[in-house]
Image (tube, helix red, strand yellow):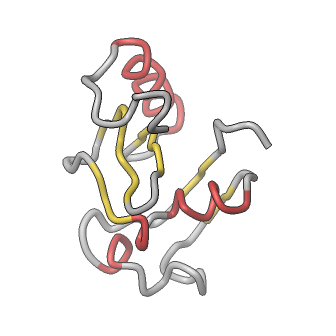
Amino acid sequence: LRKAAILDTPQEKEYDDIIQTLYWVSGFPMAHISLVDDSRQWFKARTGLNVPETSRTVSFCDHVVENREPLIVLDAKAHPSFCDNPLVTGEPGIRCYVGYPIIPS
């Protein structure tokens, strides 16, 4: 990501359009494209989420990046890996998560 110089760049219509479409089609209360570096996940595009980044330690996306495969969590409150996550127990109160890696395997 550092070599690509994409972190902390301004919003781009193409990414925003993708997220708006996913948000509309899924019916989920939030959607985002996140880029994960050494210490954080940064949101290149987002809707329904008011923060530009979160710590990688609480990131659901970290699991997707580490395993390089899709992740579906139907009930985050009941999932052993996420039930104590502050993004589940506090704001924004994540209940369901669907993530797909956009990096090559």
Q: Quadrant of residue 59?
A: bottom left
**Horizontal side, residue 71 vs residue 44: left or right:** right
Residue 30 location (% of width, % of height): 37, 45
**Horizontal side, residue 31 vs residue 79: left or right:** left
Residue 42 location (% of width, % of height): 35, 46
**Horizontal side, residue 54 vs residue 24: left or right:** left
**Is the residue 97 above or below the residue 28 in the image?**
below
At x 61%, y 64%, the residue is: 63
At x 66%, y 59%, the residue is: 72
Residue positioned most to the top? 13
Residue positioned most to the right? 105
Residue 100 location (% of width, % of height): 65, 45
**Is the residue 37 above or below the residue 79 in the image?**
above
Q: Which part of the image, by quadrant, shows the C terminus?
A: top right
Q: Quadrant of residue 56?
A: bottom left
At x 35%, y 41%, the residue is: 43
At x 48%, y 84%, the residue is: 83
